[in-house]
Image (cartoon, helix red, strand yellow):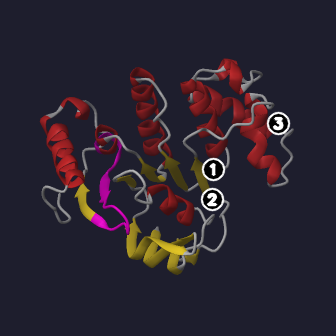
Amino acid sequence: MISCQNCALIYTQNKSSVIVYDNFSLQVETGECLALIGPSGCGKSSLLYMLAGLRPPTRGLIQINGRDVTSPRLETGFILQEYGLFPWLTVEKNILLGLKIRGMNVSSPFDHLQLDTLLEELHISGTKKRYPGQLSGGQRQRVALARSLILNPDLLLMDEPFSSLDALTRESMQKLLLSIHKNRHLTTVLVTHNIEEAVLLGTRILVLTSLPAGIAGEILNPLAGSPEYRNSEEFFRQTRRVRTLLTGEEHYGSSS
């Protein structure tokens, strides 16, 4: 679904150049959940912005479903680390904002039926008239997720979406994301700093190096999302492999 071919991303700061990516290539299949993990500042978020069409590569080509990405596409949902909710809008208005920006009639019965169904699916049915400041962190993250899902995306980009949540809420959101990914067959690219989260959610895990970012290793992880995976020996084996790649002790190629 996603093809990133020989991409470079170069910033200019104080008359000097910072090379974030140089001849970087990536393929993501339809329905895959790709987890990106790597050192802080290695360009993980920048890669999401390029895939979203918000930051063009300095050179190279990015395609989604065979079409060049030169601007934001309607079918891509993007969830930011800090939720991106407007504090002066209610939950309902925050969720419907994307539809409104697209010029759709958000007062139609269909849109509100879709909204109510989403709120129920995400277990925040009683929050429709509340404001973000009246919600917990987990509820705010569910609202951000609802705002993307109501647009019926085929691609979901997530930039450390659960990093600010407490442990129990984070596990709850991880389970919710796995359920949504399975039920909606969404292609997902997830950035995380958490090794266990990458292994739990990513059907494929890509470990990036420091700048200029390259691929330290790629791990196929077909058991991601399966029941009781978190407590299995295979889960702990995969977390050890990711940790080894991150610390640079050993490099793996693509493996199953």
Look at label 3 and name its amino acid. Answer: Pro
Residue 92, image quadrant = top right
Question: Circle 1 — which element?
Answer: loop
Label number found at residue 109: 3
Tell me the residue that label 1 is attached to: 152
Q: Is residue 111 above or below residue 23?
A: above
Residue ID at (63%, 45%)? 148
Q: Is residue 51 above or below residue 3?
A: above
Find out whether the residues at labels 2 and 1 contact each other: C-beta distance under 8 Å. yes
Tell me if 126 is positioned left or right of 168 in this view: right
Q: Nearer the viewer, residue 51 or 210?
A: 210
Tell me the residue that label 2 is attached to: 75
Look at label 1 and name its amino acid. Answer: Asn
Residue ID at (24%, 44%)? 223
Give the Cα distance between marks 3 and 2. 22 Å
Label number found at residue 95: none
Residue 239 x/y as whole percent = 21, 42
Q: Earlier in the sequence, mark 3 or mark 2?
A: 2
Give the Cα distance between marks 2 and 1. 7 Å
Q: Nearer the viewer, mark 3 or mark 2?
A: 2
Residue 44, image quadrant = bottom left
Q: Local crowd at mark 3 within 10 Å, few (<14), some, or many (≥20)?
A: few
Q: Which region of the structure is painted magenta?
A: 199-215
Q: Local crowd at mark 1 within 10 Å, few (<14), some, or many (≥20)?
A: some
Q: Is residue 204 magenta?
A: yes
Residue ID at (24%, 56%)? 220
Residue 108 x/y as whole percent = 85, 40
